[in-house]
Image (cartoon, rainbow, N blue to C red):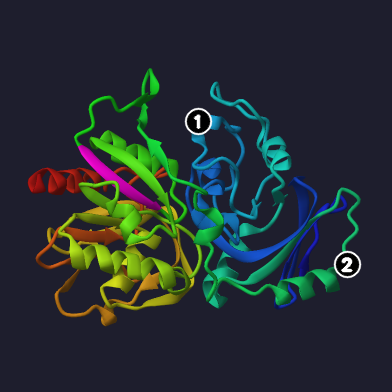
Amino acid sequence: MAQQPSPRPTACLALADGTLFFGHGFGATGETTAELCFNTAMTGYQEIMTDPSYAGQIVTFTFPHIGNTGVTPEDDETADPVAAGMVVKWDPTVASSWRATQELGDWLAARGRIAIGGVDTRRLTRAIRQSGAPHVALSHDPEGNFDVESLVAAARGFAGLEGVDLAKDVTCAQSYHWNEMRWAWPDGYLPQTAPKHKVVAIDYGAKRNILRCLASAGCDVTVLPATATAEEVLAHDPDGVFLSNGPGDPAATGKYAVPMIQKILNTTDLPMFGICLGHQMLALALGAQTIKMNHGHHGANHPVQDKDTGKVEITSMNHGFAVDSQSLPEGILETHVSLFDGSNCGIRMKDRPVYSVQHHPEASPGPQDSFYLFERFAAHMAARS
């Protein structure tokens, strides 16, 4: 089946099952293959495209108004877009925001990312929900010349994300220091000038706003690459260790991350806090298992319940793998669950300040209901000193 609007389409999205979506291309020209997911956030398309957790994925935006506020360097979560491409309902309009420094299409083109507009994203999203995240090929040709058989074959040839360690592709090349705090009117991003706690953050694909939240909670942050050893972490004499978000299969990244985490847990009493892939790394290190989800959780409106308090938080999420709550060993408590499907969204050690969450308390985009987790981390470090 093919959706083919008029005038002549300049972009084509081909699914591995042979389904074709035609539309209007913008951004870079060319072809790319990836896993396709959908994101339900109504704002924050720039933050989503630059979130390293989207490596190896093309994002379908369910909200139709994408691009209408343009882009600004202040909203980048990393230096360049990491998502392979984007799919939208309506072609981006001219940017209408005092903060905009560039049009979305120009920004994507300059950074080699392909996008398609004019697609029935409702139909596409329903297909993803029903059949799981498909492998796809996305092509943008201003002349509208598409070899659809070749595109379908490319989609079928995509290796997928299971068993793939993508953290090593998006992590920092060397360690660096971070002291920039969260954005605040009217001054923007200000530096942390009086930190109280030394934190080593392991970068599996860290978003900048996570590091800003740590700094705003009073942390002096040193970021280390994903492959850092326990010895390298402890050489900085930290008060706490943070495990960041990131892309790919946690079991693959865990081959080198898990031994490092286990050694720190076994030789120190340091507080430890993980988010997203960092949550999955901690779970694996504690003896649990992870599983691939049907279509994952991607959006800024996900209800999560704190099992200790009963409180419901509206959160941002971006993950295609999850911790299997049935595999949690004795002494590891489930702290948060998704109210959409009951999947695990948080764990903690019973008798130590070691915990993690699947959702994104730093938001960007999304609500800030869960920011207290950064303050909790700082409180644990303060109690230890």
In the rendered image, residue 21, in percent from the top left (x then y), is placed at 74, 63
Q: Residue 271 in the image: x percent, y percent?
A: 19, 54
Residue count near mark 2 (Cα–Cα under 10 Å), binned few <14, some 14–19, many ≥20: few
**What residue is at 32 percent from the left and 53 percent from the top?**
233
At 27% from the left and 53% from the top, the residue drawn is: 234
> Residue 147's mark?
2
Q: Quadrant of residue 125?
A: bottom right
- 43 on left or right of 352: right
Q: Residue at x 32, y 58 (%)?
A: 231
Label 2 sits on a secondary structure element that is loop
Any part of residue 159 in sight: yes
Secondary structure mainly formed by the magenta segment: strand
Coordinates of residue 88 in the picture (x, y in percent): 64, 51
Label annotation for residue 74? 1
> Amino acid under label 2?
Asp
Residue 199 forms part of the magenta stretch: yes
Quadrant position of residue 297: bottom left
The relative height of residue 342 versus residue 46 in the rendered view (above or below) is: below
The part of the image, by quadrant, that contains residue 123 is: bottom right
The stretch of residues the image draws in magenta is: 197-202
Q: Is residue 54 magenta?
A: no
- Residue 221 vs residue 83, the one in the foreground: 221
Nearer-N-terminus badge (1/2): 1
Q: Secondary structure at mark 1?
A: helix
- Residue type at numbered disc 1: Glu
User: In which quadrant of the rendered image does the C terminus lie?
Assistant: top left
Residue 101 relative to residue 279: left or right: right
Q: CA distance from mark 1 to mark 2?
A: 39 Å
- Say whether marks 1 and 2 touch (CB < 8 Å): no
